[in-house]
Image: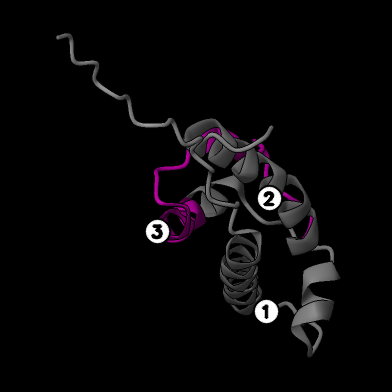
Amino acid sequence: MAVAALARPVTPRVPAPFPAAAVEAGLRNELLEAVKAEAEIKGSALPATATDIAKTAFQVDSLVVVSILCKIEPIVGFELPDSVVRGGGYGSVDSALAQLLPRIEAQWNKRKGGKP
């Protein structure tokens, strides 16, 4: 008598959703702190609220942003390549966020199997 082994049903792996809110909050906080520190060094005045600071034209150096990626890596669970940061920096916190978030999400999808 032959005995057939039953294969376990294959359950499709559902990728974890991109933690967009946590990544954005972490980036925003670190970028704002970097801008405040740089403004203090330069003696530049900044608006009173974080929302207004984020909109204010202020050069954010790309090397500073690369160092900020290290603070985001625990949220995404992997090392982010420096290539997610645009060379030359950004003109404001909001412009940095607008460019960085989709690139970080693309890296997430590449590694975690989410939809592109």
Residue positioned 60% across, 38% down in the render: 114
**What crowding class fits label 1: few (fewer than 14 Cα within 10 Å), some (14-19), or many (20 or more)?**
few
The nearer-to-camera label among 3 and 1 is 3
The relative height of residue 104 versus residue 54 in the rendered view (above or below) is above
The relative height of residue 108 versus residue 44 in the rendered view (above or below) is above
Sooner in the amino-acid sequence: mark 3 or mark 1: 1
- In the picture provided, is 111 more to the left or to the right than 32? left
Residue positioned 65% across, 66% down in the render: 21
- Confirm or deny contact between disc 3 and disc 1 (CB under 8 A): no
Spot occupied by residue 31 in the image (x, y as percentages of width and height): 62, 66
Residue lying at the far left of the rendered structure: 1
Highlighted range, magenta = 67-92
Residue positioned 17% across, 9% down in the render: 2
The Cα atoms of the two marked residues, 3 and 2, are separated by 15 Å
Camera-nearest residue between 85 and 46 = 85
Residue flagged by tag 3: what amino acid is it?
Pro
The nearer-to-camera label among 1 and 2 is 2
Q: Which residue is mark 3?
A: 74
